[in-house]
Image: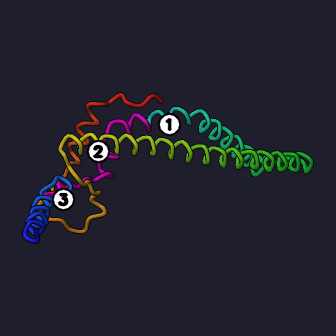
């Protein structure tokens, strides 16, 4: 009976490590930052954001130019005290409005960029999962998190190629 248990224990020790989960882990690295800037979806997302925010940006630029014209007018023209005070009040009022618009624009721009970045990162992680399942990789590490690893496959270009095949993925 003792020999029987020893044989089963020995057999388990020999068999368990050869299971896929324990033996020969396939580890690969990836450069997510490189993928982020190389995929065509990022460029199309950037162009879309620029188009969305362009109207607000043009309004701010127009207000800024008009404000600068009033400041120049106040400095260079000989005006009565009453007109000077009136223009100064207008300048202060328009400056406050401009600052509020800039603040709103900046906040909106930041939010839109974060949303776009998150969409792109989710897309990249989905691509990584596809490549990892296809290649039967057990572990995918970002290259920025690895200090040194010898003879490890880099699947960055595989992910970029897959992204190029799926060019029109986002519905903005």
Q: Name the residue under label 3.
A: 22
Provide the residue designation for mark 1: 49
Q: Is mark 2 on a helix, strand or loop?
A: helix
Instruction: Point out the tag, 3 or 1, that comes first from the N-terminus.
Output: 3
Residue 69 located left or right of residue 159: right
Q: Which residue is depicted at the point 75% across and 45% down? A: 97
Can you name the residue that lies furthest to the front here?
1
Q: Name the disc covering residue 153, or none.
A: none
Horizontal and vertical percent position of residue 70: 75, 44
Does 114 appear in magenta?
A: no
Q: Residue, x 91% and y 51% (percent of image)?
A: 81
Q: In front here: 57 or 136?
A: 136
Residue at 85 percent of width and 47 percent of height: 79
- Residue 8, image x, y percentages: 11, 63
Residue at image location 30% in from the left, 61% down from the top: 144
* CA gap, disc 3 and disc 1: 46 Å
Q: Give the range drawn in magenta.
A: 23-46
Disc 1 or 2, which lies upstream in sequence? 1
Q: Are marks 1 and 2 in contact (CB under 8 Å)?
A: no
Q: Marks 2 and 3, how far apart in space?
A: 22 Å
The residue pinned by badge 2 equals: 128
Quarter of the picture containing the N terminus is bottom left
As for residue 28 lying within the magenta part, the answer is yes
Mark 1 residue element: helix
- In this rendering, the answer to whether 53 lies above or below 35 is above
């Amino acid at each position: 009976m003792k020999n029987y248990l020893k044989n089963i224990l020995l057999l388990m020790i020999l068999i368990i490590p050869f299971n896929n989960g324990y033996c020969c882990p396939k580890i690969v690295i990836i450069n997510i930052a490189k993928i982020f800037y190389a995929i065509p979806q990022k460029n199309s997302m950037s162009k879309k954001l620029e188009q969305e925010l362009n109207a607000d940006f043009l309004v701010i630029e127009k207000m800024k130019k008009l404000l600068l014209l009033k400041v120049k007018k106040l400095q260079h023209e000989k005006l009565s005290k009453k007109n000077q005070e009136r223009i100064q009040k207008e300048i202060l009022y328009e400056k406050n409005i401009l600052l509020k618009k800039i603040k709103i624009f900046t906040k909106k721009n930041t939010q839109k960029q974060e949303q776009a970045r998150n969409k792109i990162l989710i897309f990249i992680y989905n691509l990584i999962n596809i490549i990892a399942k296809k290649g039967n990789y057990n572990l995918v590490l970002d290259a920025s998190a690895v200090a040194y690893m010898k003879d490890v496959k880099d699947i960055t270009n595989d992910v970029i190629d897959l992204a190029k095949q799926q060019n029109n993925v986002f519905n903005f």
